[in-house]
Image (tube, rainbow, N blue to C red):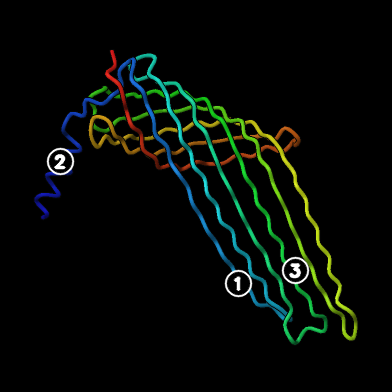
Amino acid sequence: MRTAALIAIFSILYCPAHSQLDKGQWLTGGSGRFGHSKTDVDYPGGNQESSSTYLEFLPGGGYFFADKFCAGLRLSVSNVTSKQEIRSNASSPILFSAVAKSEISGFGISPFVRYYFLKKSSKINLFADASYLYEDTKQEYRQRQESTPPGGMPSISESFSKTSSTSNGFSIAAGPAFFLNPKVAIELSVGYTTSKGDDSEAKETGILLGVGFAIHLGKGK
């Protein structure tokens, strides 16, 4: 079995890929991200539970206008839901509970350009990618509180808010593309991104780490 594995690795690294990087080819693919976190904290008089779930899907496609040079469009669809719950325990003089829920959904559109640096036949190629991002974000927030003082009547309050915003940004990234066969590649990348909301002076920057796949289609020139 070890011999077979070595042969497979050797084939991936050294056999020509005849990759689809010619003028007239199409590039399609995408990536997804998922995350979930949960915390449970006890403190004198009560308990706090928090949870959050993050989901993002990034499909896209492009066209090779020249050998090894591609331009196209990506979409981003994201959703973040979170919940926080605080409750008093029997030792607290005031019975209290509060539940807050929020949901953030975003939709973005991102034109991009990409260039591959090595020979078109390389099994492992290196690419650089630059893109512009416009994103529309909507947020809903709900909160419910209930408290009962000693010897008093319960008091309940509820609130709801809904907001929306837009942002613009740029990102650059680079990394290797591993061609599993002439049409399919696994891509790793690291990059830098910056964005700014239309209704805010604050600017956000960050480092991007990406894993995705790409499918190369068409007969080319």
**What residue do we see at 62% from left, 34% from top?**
135
Quarter holding the N terminus? bottom left
Q: Which of the labelled discs sits on residue 10, or is there none?
A: 2
**What residue do we see at 75% from left, 87% from top?**
91
Query: Where does residue 35 sit, x and y in percent of width and height?
Result: 51, 55
Q: Which residue was labeled with disc 1?
A: 40
Q: Amino acid at mark 3?
A: Ala
Question: Could you tell which of marks 2 and 3 lies nearer the N-terminus?
Answer: 2
Closer to the camera in the image, 124 or 104:
104
Vertical side of 62 occupied by 178: above or below:
below
**What residue do we see at 78% from left, 83% from top?**
92
On the picture, is 4 further left or further right than 57?
left
- Nearer the viewer's eye, disc 2 or disc 1? 1
- Asked if the residue at tag 3 contacts the one at tag 2, i.e. Cβ–Cβ closer than 8 Å, the answer is no
Task: Count neighbours of disc 2 (C-alpha within 10 A) and say few if under 14, some if 14 to 19, many if 20 or more.
Answer: few
Spatial separation of the CA atoms under disc 2 and disc 3? 59 Å
- Asked if the residue at tag 1 contacts the one at tag 3, i.e. Cβ–Cβ closer than 8 Å, the answer is no
Q: Tell me the element at label 2.
A: helix
Spatial separation of the CA atoms under disc 2 and disc 1? 49 Å
Q: Which residue was labeled with disc 3?
A: 98
